[in-house]
Image (cartoon, grey):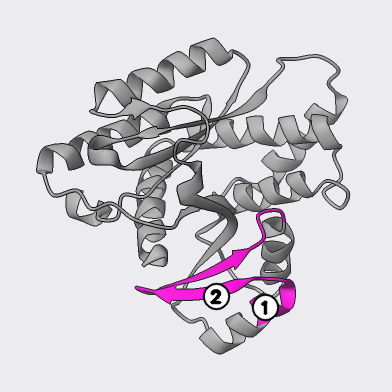
Amino acid sequence: MSGHNKWSTIKRKKEKTDNARAKVFTKIGREIAVVVREGGPDPANNSKLKDVIAKAKANNVPNDNIERIIKKAAGETGGADYETIIYEGYGPKGVAVIVEALTDNRNRTAGDVRHYFDKFGGNMGQSGSVNFLFSKQGVILIESEDVDEEALMEDALEAGATDFLTDEGIFEVRTDPYDCGAVSEALAAKGYKFLSAEAAYIPSTYVTLTEQEDMVNMNKMLDMFDDNDDIQGVWHNWENTDDAE
């Protein structure tokens, strides 16, 4: 169930990436720069950087781009002061939504997030209002075509994975949220290609929308979040995303 729901979200993200690759690169570039300034340019000594590099590679950011951003960030002494902020709220009919932003202006970003919730039939909640419905885990998605399931499961667990799921042609490797980069790096070294590799909020329960208007509004809300440069990731417990396509 969770693998299917996550894959639906990844499909939406991939479509957006195909149509707006420059925007995706910009968001990930900002994330890399921030973690380099916080923990240094060596991924061996900066687990957050290792995780973001894995995310960048899964999004097809060229290695040259990644190295260039790291070198630039390592040499910078000033620049914008970005902070990570987590917003929580509800979409139509009580769909739980978590929004992760990386911003240099929390008033601007909070205003945008609140507007998106309100505009499409939801509302922004207080900190902790929906977080308890999710658990943060590392998630690595691999297409099952030409991949031996038993071999991948063995390699994943050996690399430090905590769980292994399969559904609808997708293998899903779960890790501790801070081990995603290390596990994906170990699997990449064995030749595996990823659809996605990032820390994600996994819902414990799901909400099914039955009205077409609610599904349309939920998709419009997600599109608005995706298009905002400050927003790095959005997670939700809407189950039937395919029905709204």
Q: Which residues are magenta?
A: 155-178
The residue at which mark 1 appears reads as: 157
Asked if the residue at tag 2 contacts the one at tag 1, i.e. Cβ–Cβ closer than 8 Å, the answer is yes
Instruction: Judge the density around disc 2: few (<14), some (14-19), many (≥20) Cα neighbours within 10 Å.
Output: some
Give the amino acid type for the residue marked by disc 1 in the picture. Answer: Leu
User: The residue tagged with tag 1: helix, strand or loop?
Assistant: helix
175 versus 207 height, above or below: below
> Looking at the picture, how far across and down is residue 204, in whole percent?
43, 58
Q: Is residue 194 left or right of residue 182?
A: left
Determine if the magenta segment contains residue 99: no
Query: Does residue 161 appear in the picture of this structure?
Result: yes
> Looking at the picture, how far across and down is residue 39, in whole percent?
84, 37
> Looking at the picture, how far across and down is residue 227, in whole percent?
40, 28
Instruction: Judge the density around disc 1: few (<14), some (14-19), many (≥20) Cα neighbours within 10 Å.
Output: some
> Looking at the picture, how far across and down is residue 187, in whole percent?
67, 70
Q: Is residue 118 left or right of residue 98?
A: left
Residue at horizontal 73 percent and vertical 79 percent from the top: 158
Residue 164 shows which numbered tag?
2
Tell me where residue 191 sits by quadrant: bottom right
